[in-house]
Image: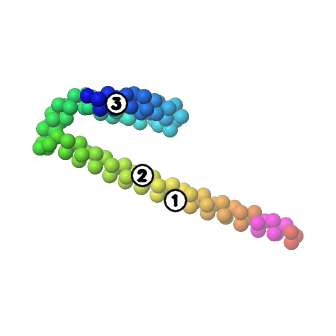
């Protein structure tokens, strides 16, 4: 019972304000904010009513209900890892293109300046 109160307090005092703050700074889309809030509310419901985990596990056909959440968690983490890897690669490509454009612009300016000196 104590852990339920501590986790609930932590979510209400630390997590939800952080989500709201990120949303206000436009670091989080409205859809993302709603999704995270629903995720944390679902987690709180499962913490306060643990028998619901058994219903979910039995409906998924898993012997131990917590195994279903571990499997779902692993799949989610792999998805997030893949998504971040894709985003990092896209950012690397953008940085490379910007760097090339910048260097070409500098070289062009330098050659233009050199031409002006010789003329």
Res. 45 image quadrant = top left
Q: Residue at x 47, y 55 (%)?
A: 88
User: Magenta segment range?
Assistant: 110-116
Q: Secondary structure at mark 3?
A: helix
Upstream in the sequence, badge 3 or badge 1? Answer: 3
| As drawn, 21 above or below 79 | above
* Residue 93 marker: 1
Q: Quadrant of the N terminus?
A: top left
Q: Residue at x 23, y 47 (%)?
A: 71
The one nearer the camera, 22 or 49, is 49
* Residue 6 marker: 3
Residue at mark 2: 84
Q: Residue at x 34, y 30 (%)?
A: 6
> Is residue 114 inside the magenta stretch?
yes
Q: Residue at x 49, y 35 (%)?
A: 22
Q: In this image, 100 relative to 74: left or right?
A: right
The one nearer the camera, 101 or 8, is 8
């Amino acid at each position: 019972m104590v852990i339920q109160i501590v986790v609930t307090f932590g979510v209400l005092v630390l997590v939800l304000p952080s989500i709201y703050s990120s949303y206000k700074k436009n670091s989080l889309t409205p859809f993302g904010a709603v999704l995270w809030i629903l995720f944390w509310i679902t987690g709180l419901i499962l913490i306060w009513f643990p028998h619901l985990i058994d219903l979910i596990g039995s409906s998924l056909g898993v012997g131990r209900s917590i195994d279903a959440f571990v499997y779902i968690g692993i799949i989610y983490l792999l998805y997030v890892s893949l998504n971040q890897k894709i985003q990092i690669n896209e950012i690397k490509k953008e940085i490379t293109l910007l760097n090339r454009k910048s260097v070409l612009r500098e070289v062009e300016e330098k050659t233009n300046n050199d031409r002006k000196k010789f003329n």
